[in-house]
Image (tube, rainbow, N blue to C red):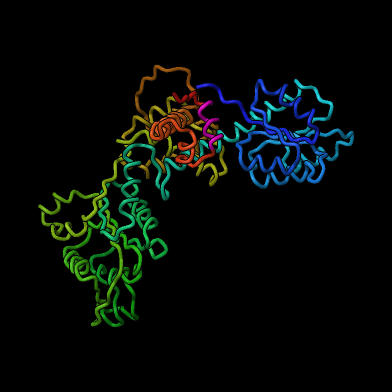
Amino acid sequence: MSQIKPAILAVDDDQDLLQTYQSVLAKKFEVKIANSGTEALKSLNTTAINLVILDIRMPKMDGIKVLEQIKQEDQNIEVIMVTASKDLNIAIETMKLGAYDYVVKPFDVKELIALIEKALEKRALRQENTSLKESLEQATSYCDLLGQSKAMQKLFKTISSVAPTNSTVLIHGESGTGKELVARAIHKKSSRGNKPFIAVNCGAIPENLFESELFGHERGSFTGAMERRVGKFELADGGTLFLDEIGCMPAAMQAKLLRVLEDRRIERLGGEKSIPINIRLVSATNIDFDKHIEEGKFRQDLYFRLNVIPIELTPLRQRKEDIPLFLNYFINKFNKILNKNIHGLEKEAMAQILAYSWPGNVRELQNMVERLVVLSEGEVITKEDLPFSLEIEIEDEPLSPSGLKDALENFEIEKIKTTLADNSGNITQAAKKLKMPRSSLISRMRALGISVN
């Protein structure tokens, strides 16, 4: 693919100077011209421009007004002001309004080209950082969930498909895999998103309080019931009720829950009135249902009612490509909270973390990162800082804190290539899919060495 030249718009009411711009800049840049401020703004609305060379003194609409309008429309366009005045106060004032720099007529062509290249380099660096962040956020985050692995991308699609329905969902996964986050994502993406999301940890409720906790009670229904209490089902009316650790629910409550799911009505403890409820039920557990059903600890008929839409969460040890993403996220999070400045990890430290099995999954990883940020005395986390020791041979050299950046960059390359392939190499369509400006995508492709056949 031939190299795409940066697009420059030269604006001046002097036609001879515009022709000079075209002749001296055309070798390195794609040069467009406009002989007035009005014409320049029209051109900017119809053409992708990287940089504007703008004369300050022009009739009708001067360069300062044009600059202000450009910056209102797109802060990313760099502007170099041109002035013939010896009074440089006006030129300096334009820099306060967002101009990159200024040149004074008559100017040296080589100096102008050098200034243009510096301005474009600044713009490209800013856009690289912005586009990397935006593309990663779009591709790896979903309602507070993070993940670039195939398992997480599949999960995001499943949530998008399931959320608009009212079907009952059962989330199964190990401790620390983010079961409640998935439940909240389903709620947020549903038509119930502006209604209550009520979470109940079934493992934390004493057996004798289960019915009151879920269905509520009337005053005097039992000793200590001094007033009416509304249960979680009623509190969640119109929204989503999330029953975490549902495998801990006592057998007597399992039967009552089954009845509620069939009738869509509840009765408060000690009450006589049947109350209709409109909730979506999402449950979660880490138990082996087959074993619990076989041992008589969980009702099979209730399991069938809960397991209409099953979602299985993949443990972190099976999606290790997500670990650098979580590390980056948690390091940034705890840097802000703790006022620290940790940049990343040495290569050996990253290798040990990737080799660890993470039985506590993302929760364990988060706790470890917080501990590392608190205790680290340097700006880079080393192998010696880690709370566990694994014997790992690393043949690559040298050691550097770039492992995290490399992992994110590799993902970005793969994401861009996949999106381009899905859109038959059409950069414009790929940029729309990635939700980033076409010029930003082209800049990233150049920086990452990606070409289109």
What's drawn in magenta, residue-wise? 438-447
Where residue 336 appears, as percent x and y from the top left, is: 55, 44
Where residue 14 appears, as percent x and y from the top left, is: 80, 33
Which is nearer the eye, 86 or 278?
86
Total marks in image: 0
Image quarter for residue 150?
top left
Task: Name above or below for residue 40 compared with residue 421.
Answer: below
Image quarter for residue 7?
top right
Task: Name above or below for residue 338 compared with residue 189.
Answer: above
Question: Extreme right residue here?
Answer: 86
Where residue 65 appears, as percent x and y from the top left, is: 76, 46
Q: Is residue 386 visible?
A: no
Q: Residue at x 32, y 71 (%)?
A: 234
Quarter holding the C terminus is top left
Q: Magenta span: helix, strand or loop, mainly?
A: helix
Taking the image as shown, residue 158 lies to the left or right of residue 41, namely left
